[in-house]
Amino acid sequence: MTFNANIKLLRQRRKLTQDHVAGELGISRSTLNSYENGSVQNPTLEMLLSFSKYFRVSIDTLVKLDLQKLSEFQLSELERGHDVFVTGARLRVLATTVDSSNKENIEVVPIKAKAGYKNGFADPEFIKKLPTFQLPILFNERKYRMFQITGDSMLPIPDKSWVIGEYVENFYDIKDGSAYVLLTQEDGVVFKVAYNQIRKKKNLLLKSLNPAYDPYEVPATDIREAWKFCNYISAELPEEYWAKDRVLKRIEKMEAEMKDLKGSL
């Protein structure tokens, strides 16, 4: 029965002793041990409710899912309250892949796969076909994906750069002024700086780094996925950056040269 292994796993992940958990639940350590080792196969509803409340995980999850088969990211999401049996339709189910050691892969969405990703983002079979890699400098308990961007709207990040994003489960957590890779129903994959207007206007305001592009709003209901910008990879060397004070000094110098030129005429 998965329940027995699940409560043991949840306890051990919190680094709690049987004595501590038993005391919190108001039962003896030997009783808790009987639950964990499977001696008790049919816990009472009262005990199921107690374990569910203590670990903040639904009864359905405790008895139906084998938590040992979940990846570190999936377990972390569960422990943060993103339980499919609790949140129901509000939970965005993320199709993902893991390596041979059950560690989350970083899936890669190149330009040629972006059109298919728009429709296949929730299809495990489609996600399995994407290239994958590991990056040891990232956190194990978080989920990452890499997207190849196109165009010049986010200059100085060059066209065809590879952007790595961290998965955002709750769109209310999108922070003003931060960059995100967003999957939208209308435009597919876009990379923009976002401003969260969901509570007030039920949308996101999206801006480009390139001022030649106008900001625009996207309804929250049009958003399918959000990935917070972490870093990017590019084979192109960025162009020289001209700081504002440097530009002003250059203009002042040119004005002085023009004044001297007029004075000599």
Image (spheres, rainbow, N blue to C red):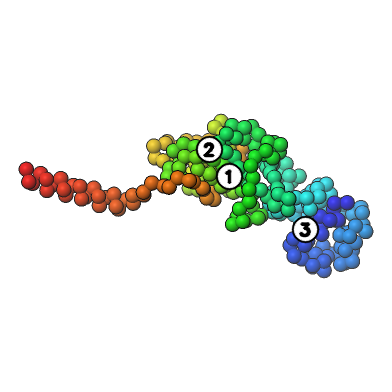
Residue 61 in the image: x percent, y percent? 79, 48
The answer to whether the residues at label 2 and label 1 have Cβ atoms under 8 Å apart is no
Which part of the image, by quadrant, shows the C terminus? top left
Residue 221 visible here: no
Which comes sooner in the sequence, label 3 or label 2? 3
Q: Secondary structure at mark 2?
A: strand
Residue at the spot x=67%, y=38% of the render? 129
Q: Residues within 10 Å of mark 1 (few under 14, many from 20)?
A: many
Three-letter amino acid code of the residue under disc 3 = Leu
Most distant residue in the left direction: 265
Which comes sooner in the sequence, label 3 or label 1? 3
Most distant residue in the front direction: 235
Position of residue 79 relative to residue 17, above or below, is above
Residue 211 in the image: x percent, y percent? 39, 40
From the viewer's side, name the closer residue of 118 and 224: 118
Residue at the spot x=82%, y=59% of the render? 8
From the viewer's side, name the closer residue of 54 and 239: 239
Task: Measure the C-alpha gap from mark 2 to mark 1.
Answer: 13 Å
Q: Residues within 10 Å of mark 3 (few under 14, many from 20)?
A: some
Return the residue at label 2: 190
Return the residue at label 1: 146
Three-letter amino acid code of the residue under disc 1 = Met
Quarter where residue 219 is shown: top right
Residue at the spot x=29%, y=52% of the render? 246
The circle drawn on residue 10 is 3
